[in-house]
Amino acid sequence: MSAGGAGPASFGGGPRGPPTTPPGDRPAWPSANGQQAVTATISVSGTLDGGMKRYYGSGALGDDGQSEDLPALFELADGATLQNVILGSPAADGVHCKGACTLKNVWWEDVGEDAATFRGSSASLVRTVDGGGAKLASDKVFQHNGAGTLVVKNFQADDIGKLVRSCGNCSTQYARHIQVQNVWLTAPADSLVGINTNYGDTARLSAVTVYDDPGRDIEICTKYKGTTSGEPSKIGSGPDSTNCLYRESDITYVD
Ligand code: ADA
Ligand code: CA
Ligand code: CA
């Protein structure tokens, strides 16, 4: 292969570059290229490319528990990109995004309270998670607390609670839209996506592969009645034409 066109063959692809794998192929979990303790939240505006370094919490960020209001290892400004990063353990509250941020090829080896939280009050906001993966989430991986859309694509998750949840009880609630495309989920897990139908949430799912769930225990799209205080109540699950927008054929099971 020549060094022209799409770029030198030594760049892109593989565990050290951005995902170039076509839809359908699950990439290998990457190995870290060095590591760094994070003792104070790293603010990101523009792009932070970690070169596949592992970042793990220490000191004030050394909490591996499930208490709410933990600080994040990375806090992304509106428009920021975090890429080629591994979050090790402990990971506290992972990544916080204030607006239309992008997480590209970001991997969580042992999710903290959650992996990433998305905020921002504009209905036109779109944030994107492209590539990467998450393991060992006691509860949620992606917490959508803002308005607008969250896209998760080319992502793998293994032993989690929920992959994406539209906040069930945030004090300000919004209509939230979730797109999950080309995602590999390995049991155990409670749910792929959880949405609040009473606030007009939608989830569009395509090319989802579920591994090791012969009992079909994982809920694909769980519907709740969200609240602004107290616990949300579960209404049901499964595809429909208004909120959980997918067909059974969008989900492939590999038992
Ligand atoms: C839980 C909690 C929310 C919010 C969320 C989060 O769902 O009920 O209020 O704290 O976690 O962002 O982690
Ligand atoms: Ca939480
Ligand atoms: Ca959290």
Image: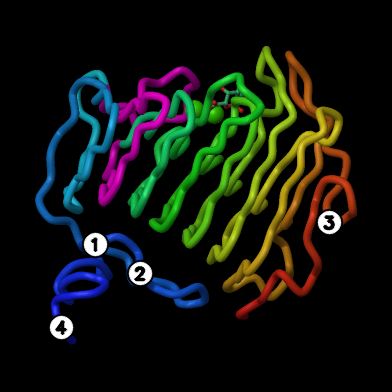
Q: Which residue is outermost to the front?
A: 5
At label 2, counting other C-alpha atoms closer than 10 Å, the crowd grade (few under 14, some 14-19, many 20 or more) is: few
Q: CA distance from mark 3 to mark 4?
A: 48 Å
Question: Please, is residue 56 above or below residue 159 in the view?
Answer: above
Which is nearer the N-term, disc 4 or disc 1?
4
Q: Is residue 161 in view?
A: no
- Name the image quarter holding the N terminus: bottom left
**Where's ligand 2: which quadrant?**
top right
What mark, if any, has residue 20 been given in the picture? 2
- Residue under the image location 66 percent in, 27 percent down: 123
Q: Main secondary structure of the magenta part?
A: loop
At label 4, counting other C-alpha atoms closer than 10 Å, the crowd grade (few under 14, some 14-19, many 20 or more) is: few
At label 3, counting other C-alpha atoms closer than 10 Å, the crowd grade (few under 14, some 14-19, many 20 or more) is: some
Compare residues 161 and 175 and report the one nearer the observer.
175
Element at label 2:
loop
Which is nearer the N-term, disc 3 or disc 4?
4
Q: Is residue 208 magenta?
A: no
Q: Are marks 2 and 1 in contact (CB under 8 Å)?
A: yes
Residues drawn in magenta: 61-90
Q: Which residue is mark 4?
A: 2
Which is nearer the N-term, disc 2 or disc 3?
2
- Amino acid type at circle 2 is Thr
Q: CA distance from mark 2 to mark 3?
A: 32 Å
Q: Closer to the observer: label 2 or label 3?
A: 2
- Amino acid type at circle 1 is Gly
